[in-house]
Image: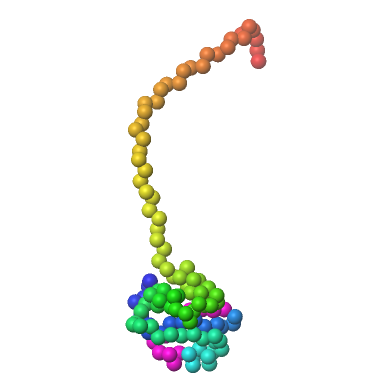
Amino acid sequence: MATDKQFTVAGVSKLDGEYKVRFANDTLRIKVLAKHGHEDITLVELPSAMTKLDAVQFIKGLPEFEGASEQSAIADYLDAKAPKVKSVATPTATKAKTPVKAKAKATAKVAENEDAPF
């Protein structure tokens, strides 16, 4: 992540019909969100200050966020922000190279009229 900021409150809210994950350092954030038109605001105190990713992983299992809308918002956040693990190509056993045999030359069939033009 680009920042090391830590938050003590996390949750979700709905604005214009779309649920999103929200972060704050005080539960008074609920009043600010409500003032700006947010609905279905659910914020919880975290046990300790956490980064955004840690906070989302923590609230994912809480009963307050069991609803489909909340879980969808959390999953969307994790899909977008979770560090991507690059797949590492597993080495495969190399086959011992066998010498390539020269191909046998094909014999051309000779037509009866070898001197005839095409």
Residue 59 image position (x, y, % from top left):
43, 78
Q: Position of residue 86 (x, y in %)?
A: 40, 58
* In-image side of 34 versus 5 (left or right): right
> What's the coloring here?
rainbow
Q: Residue at x 46, y 82 (%)?
A: 11
- Give the side of residue 44 with respect to residue 67, left or right: left
**Which residue is found at the position 34% from the left and 33% from the top?**
96
Residue 55 located within the stretch drawn in magenta = no
Q: Spot the residue most to the top.
A: 112
Q: Is residue 44 above or below residue 83?
A: below
**Residue closer to the observer: 34 or 110:** 34
Q: Quadrant of the C terminus?
A: top right
The answer to whether 72 is drawn above or below residue 7 in the figure is above
Total numbered labels placed on residues in the image: 0
| Position in image of residue 8 (x %, y %) | 37, 84
* 24 in the magenta segment: yes
Q: Position of residue 90 (x, y in %)?
A: 37, 48
Residue 56 visible to an observer of this rendering: no
Q: In the rendered view, tell whether residue 2 sits above or below residue 22.
A: above
Q: Which residues are magenta?
A: 18-29
Q: Is residue 62 visible?
A: yes
Q: Quadrant of residue 62?
A: bottom left
> Looking at the figure, which quarter contains the N terminus?
bottom left
Residue drawn at (37%, 26%) of the image: 99
Q: Residue at x 36, y 31 (%)?
A: 97
Residue 9 placement: quadrant: bottom left
